[in-house]
Image (cartoon, helix red, strand yellow):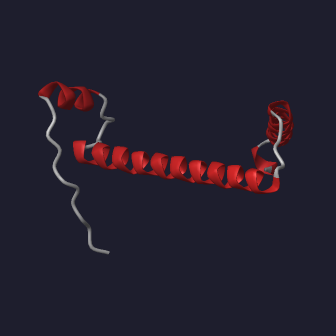
Amino acid sequence: MKTAQLPPVRVEPAVREEIESVLQEGESLSQFVETAAVQAARRRRAQQEFLARGRTSIARAMATGEFQTLHGALDEMRARLEQRMGDARRAHARGPSER
C-alpha cells in the first residue's frame, strides 16, 4: 500500500522541545506524531460511537415511554462490573498456563 503524508504542523520551539523530551529511546518525532494522531482519531471515533448509542437510546425511550431510573442503571452497571471482576480474579488464580 502506498503511504501518505500528514500536513506539516508549525509549533513553538518550546512545544517541540517538550515533545522531544518525552520521546522513547529510538523513537523519532515523526513516529510520535503519527502515534498521537492515530490515538486521537480512535478516541474521537469512540466518542462519536458513544454519542450515537446515547442518541439511539434516548430516541428508543421517547418512542416507547420506557425509561430506566438512575439507580436501576447504576445497579446494572455494578452487577456487570462485579461479574467481570470475578471473572478476572478467577482467570488470575488459574495462572497464565490455564488462561
25, above or below 65, in the image? above
Residue occupying the point 48% across, 46% down? 43
Quadrant position of the N terminus in the picture: bottom left
Name the side, left or right, on which 59 lies relative to 45.
right
Q: Nearer the viewer, residue 38 or 57?
A: 57
Quadrant in the rendering for residue 84: top right
Q: Residue 33 at x, y = what percent?
A: 28, 45
Q: Residue 80 at x, y = what percent?
A: 83, 41
Name the side, left or right, on which 16 lies relative to 69.
left
Q: Residue 86 at x, y = what percent?
A: 86, 37
Residue occupying the point 18% across, 54% down? 7
Residue occupying the point 76% across, 57% down? 63
Q: Nearer the viewer, residue 90 or 81?
A: 81
Q: Which residue occupies the extreme bottom position in the image? A: 1
75, above or below 95, in the image? above
Quadrant in the rendering for residue 60: bottom right
Residue occupying the point 24% across, 65% down? 4
Quadrant in the rendering for residue 91: top right
Name the side, left or right, on which 24 lies relative to 84.
left
Q: Residue 90 at x, y = what percent?
A: 86, 40
Say how many tags the image has: 0
30, above or below 5, in the image? above
